[in-house]
Image (spheres, helix red, strand yellow):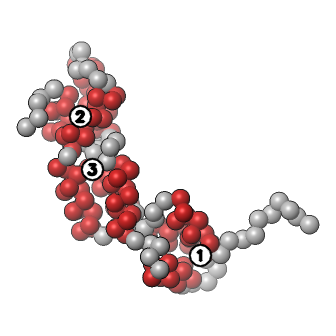
Amino acid sequence: MNFGAKPALSLTGRALRLLSTREHSRAELERKLAPHAEEEGAVAKVLDALQAKGFINETRVLESVVHRRAGKLGASRIKQELQAKGLEPEAVAEAVHALRATELERAREVWRKRFGKPPADAAERGKHMRFLASRGFGGDTIHKVVSGAEED
């Protein structure tokens, strides 16, 4: 007897295991389950059933990503993540628009946690700007934060 071998999970079991860790979009689940499908159309059937039961919900996926990432990332970076998950373009655009309203405040907080004080010279200023840019904040926002401009 081979006690170390695990029984093969069904597509539904795999999908539920993925969904138990975090929200997944339908497109994400399709990508992750496709290599395990033994017959064509099996993944679509499983996902249709899970969606009908409310296990897959694009709105929850969008809200989850925004909630988890907004404190650390700018709107551009979050937009890329949402698009990579295959969410509806209209929903992504709406979420990004809402994020842009708080972008300056969020960028200031990210900058404050990382650096806390204004840059001493041009090299340090560049470092601060690159840091914020890598987090997906926009150029205008970065300039306002690094230059220490007060809230508009």
The disc at residue 12 is 1
The local crowd at label 2, few if under 14, some if 14 to 19, many if 20 or more residues have their Cα within 10 Å, is many
Q: Secondary structure at mark 2?
A: helix
Residue 54 to residue 93: above or below: below
Whichever of callouts 3 and 1 sits on the residue coming sooner in the sequence is: 1
Query: Which one is nearer the viewer's eye here, 55 or 15?
Result: 55
The Cα atoms of the two marked residues, 2 and 1, are separated by 43 Å
Residue 95 left/right relative to 87: left
Type of the residue with mark 1: Thr
Type of the residue with mark 2: Arg
Q: Are marks 3 and 1 in contact (CB under 8 Å)?
A: no
Q: Position of residue 62 (x, y in %)?
A: 34, 62
Name the image quarter holding the N terminus: bottom right
Note whether residue 3 is visible.
yes
The disc at residue 120 is none
Looking at the rendered structure, the number of numbered marks drawn on it comes to: 3
The disc at residue 76 is 3
The local crowd at label 3, few if under 14, some if 14 to 19, many if 20 or more residues have their Cα within 10 Å, is some
Residue occupied by mark 2: 108
Query: Residue at (28%, 38%) from the top-left corner?
Result: 133
Q: Position of residue 18 (x, y in %)?
A: 55, 64
